[in-house]
Structure formats: structure tokens, C-alpha cells
Image (cartoon, rainbow, N blue to C red):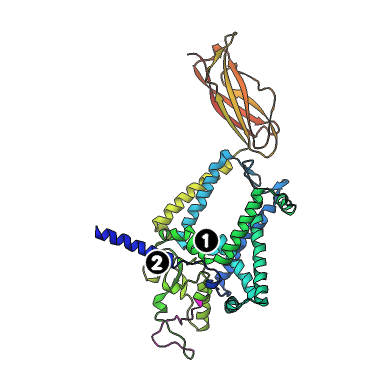
Amino acid sequence: MNDTSDAKQKIADDLYEEAGTWHVNIEAGAVFPRRMPGKFRTIKWLTHAVWLFFFFGPYMRWNGRQAILLDIPDRQFHFFELTILPQDVWMLSLTLLFFAILLAVVTSIAGRVFCGYFCFQTAWTDVFMLIEEKVEGNPSQRRKLRDAPLDFRKLRLKGTKYAIWLVISMLTGVSFAAWFTDAYELWGSYFTLSAGPVAWAVLGLFTVGTFVLAGFMREQVCFWLCPYARIQGVMYDRETILPTYDYKRGEPRGKLKKGETEPGNGDCIDCNLCVAVCPTGVDIRGGQQEGCITCGLCIDACDSVMDKINKPLGLIRYASLDEIDGKPVIKLYKRPRPLVYIGILLVALSGIIYGVTHLGTLELKVIHERAPLFVQLSDGSIQNRYDIKILNKQDKVIQVKIEAEGPDGLQISDAEKALSINPGKLLSHIVYVKVPRTNLDNSRMPLYFRVYNTENPEDSVEYKSAFFSAR
């Protein structure tokens, strides 16, 4: 009983200690990473460039309207020629599942490469710090400016930096809102101050959020706010490839003296450049840590030093723990965890492909009237009543006609004229089907309804129902 209490107390003490050391990286404690060229820095800029689509995507036009429009009020998602309605929301669910599992697959194989190269927070923070460097100077100059008393020069530099940050933050807010309404109309409503409260709220939230998170909190978001940083540990194993310090080769560390290392020292000269370039301030030589976003900038830094002192590259490199320890490297197809993730990924992808290829432009549902199930007319024929529900998945008005096929002598009424259906709307129409009693061999016989577009008869949809009569 006492052991249990002691264990609980230890957990509480650990949590208290962690909370006590928590801090938001405002300017007094900010990390000012050094920026230097290299292979992984180039890759980061290329992957960050993907986010340019976020800014310019809403302005693409397709057939006279916005190419990608998430029209929530009208419950329509437009992707070029494809229109997804609430009835097809299962495809969106599969898409979310696909990307969630894709994140798990990538993490189990190569760590937090999403965080290092594609994350919104990482990309915007990188851009904000680049602006800070251009305005205020290198890391040492920025630290001096931070500690300097407030004067005109400091006010000018800080004001310039904050103004540029604010413009980018506002453009981020407008760009996000533009995915949900016509982008050109949105700009007009902002300039004329006629935008609705939701549009202003989105602009305000994204402006403030981007300004604070990317400008001030920076790496603290990765440490304390991002749930992915907390759950990544359960996705790793000893075969996961991560930026890793080769301690066997690098230890013991030693400074260069007269251009040469001391006998017995490893290749690491303790220059701390790997720490200086890290956007989260992590010392990779201490092993894999929560703050590492696997961006590879420490690899660029270390390789540049190794090149200068004529040592082999790769003291810090992408490698698994088993590789560093000299154990046999297990092939990907023999690792159960990634294989399970990939299996789920393929199932979700198959569902998405099936949904897109079988989406169609019309959807049909037929509800048979149950009270009464059928009626016998004065001429002896049997009549059934059906409620035909037709969904137009196109973004234009269409004309459709209804046909029915079933027992011999079948006649359908109230289906002679073409019906007009507005874009994205559901039309309900009642029809009556009657069949001579002598042509009915069973109390329940198959009945097929077909609805087709009068402008393009091949654009059709069928539904199997049943015709009921007495036994």
C-alpha cells in the first residue's frame, strides 16, 4: 500500500517539476537559431513552398467559378469538376483517415518529418524568423537588440518586423476564409467593410493566432501545444530513421587544438553548431528528444564542420538506433507496425478511389408507400404508390425523366413530363405504377426505376424496388 502511495507521489512530483520549468518563449528566452545553407535547408524551403498553394489556391477558377470551394452554407464541396454533397461525406471521412494513417506511417518510418518539413507552425515560424534575421541581423545581433534599452533604433527595427509579421498574419486569415467563400467577393467585402461577422472573426482569430504562435511562441508550440509531439513516442521503434548522433564515432568530444584533435578523442569537436542551428534548441548529441522535429538542419551543420576538418561526413545523420548500435537493420517489409499502418492506408485509399469513380451526377432513392401496400382499381389492375427522391449532384439545373420496368403491362403515371432539379438539391416526386392483375405471378415482383438527364440520357441512375399485390 505504501509502495503504491510512493509511486503516485513520485508521478505527482515529476509533473510538478515539469510544470515548474514550463515557459513560453517570449523574447527574453527565445531561441535564435543560426541559419546556414545545406541540403536539408534547401529541402525545407522546397517543402515549405507547398504552402504557397494555401495562399493562391482560392484564386483558381474553373468553369466560371472557384476551382476549390468548401461551401458550408450550401453543404457543397467543389473540387474542379467534382462536387461532394453531404450524402458523400463518408469519402471525406476516409480522406481524413487516410491522412491520419499516412502521418502514422511516415512517423513510424522516418520520425517527425511532417513537423520538420510540412507543418503549418514550422513553415510560418521559419518565414517569421527569416524576416527577423533580415530586419534585426544575425542571432548575436538579435540578442543584443533584445537586451538593449528602448530607443528609436530598437523601436524602428521592432516596429518594422512586427508590421511585416502582421501583414503575413492577416493574409493567412484572409486566405483561410477564402477557401469557404468566393475569394474575390471576400476581398471586396473586407475592403468595403461589408463582410459578415464570421468572416471578421476568422480574420481576427487567424491574424492573432499566427502572429503569436509563429512570432513569439515558436518552438514552444512544438513542446507544449502540439499533441503530435506527445504521441510520437508510441509510433517510434528502434528501426525508425531519425537524425541521430553517432556517439561511437563522436565520443569522447574534444576541442580542436592547433588544427588537430587530441589523441583518443572522437570526431566531435564540441563546436555546438548543431545546437546553434536547431529551431527548437535541441542538442541532438543527448539522444532523441521530444523537441526534435527531425528537420535535418543539425546534419547540414555537422557535415559542414566535418568537411572543414577533413573528417567523414555523417557524424550526425538519418539513421535508426539499431544501425548506430551496429545491429542488423530490419527491412521495412518485415516490420509489423508500418505494415499494419500501410494496410489501413490502402483500405482508406481504395475507398476514396471507389467513391470518386462511382460518385455520379445523380442519386436516386425510391420509397414504397406502406399504407396501403397496394390498391385494386375498378378495372381489376393493382396499383402501388412510390415516392421518388432524386438528388442533383451537379452545379447546374438539370431536367430529368422517370422510367419504370417490371411486370408485363406496367403503366407509370405522373412521369410524363420532365422534372427540373436545382443544383445540389433533392427533389421528391410521387408516381403511381399499375399492372394488370393477370400479369402478376407473385405477391412481390421486382420493379426497376430509372432516372436520366434529358440532355444526356447516358447520365442516368437506377434503383431496384418491388411491386406488391395480393397473394
Q: Does the magenta-highlighted stretch encompass residue 366?
A: no
What residue is shown at x 58% (from left), y 67% (from top)?
126
Which range of residues does the magenta coloring cover? Answer: 259-274
- The answer to whether residue 241 is seen in the rendering is yes
Residue type indicated by callout 1: Phe
Front in this rendered view, residue 462 or 388: 388
25 up-or-down from 334: above or below? below
- Pinpoint residue 106: horizontal percent, then vertical percent: 48, 59
- Pinpoint residue 300: horizontal percent, then vertical percent: 53, 74
Residue type indicated by callout 2: Glu
Identify residue for label 2.
17
What residue is shown at x 62% (from left), y 21% (from top)?
431
Q: CA distance from mark 1 to mark 2?
A: 30 Å
Identify residue for label 1.
114
Per the picture, the main secondary structure of the magenta-coloured stretch is loop
**Dot label at residue 12:** none
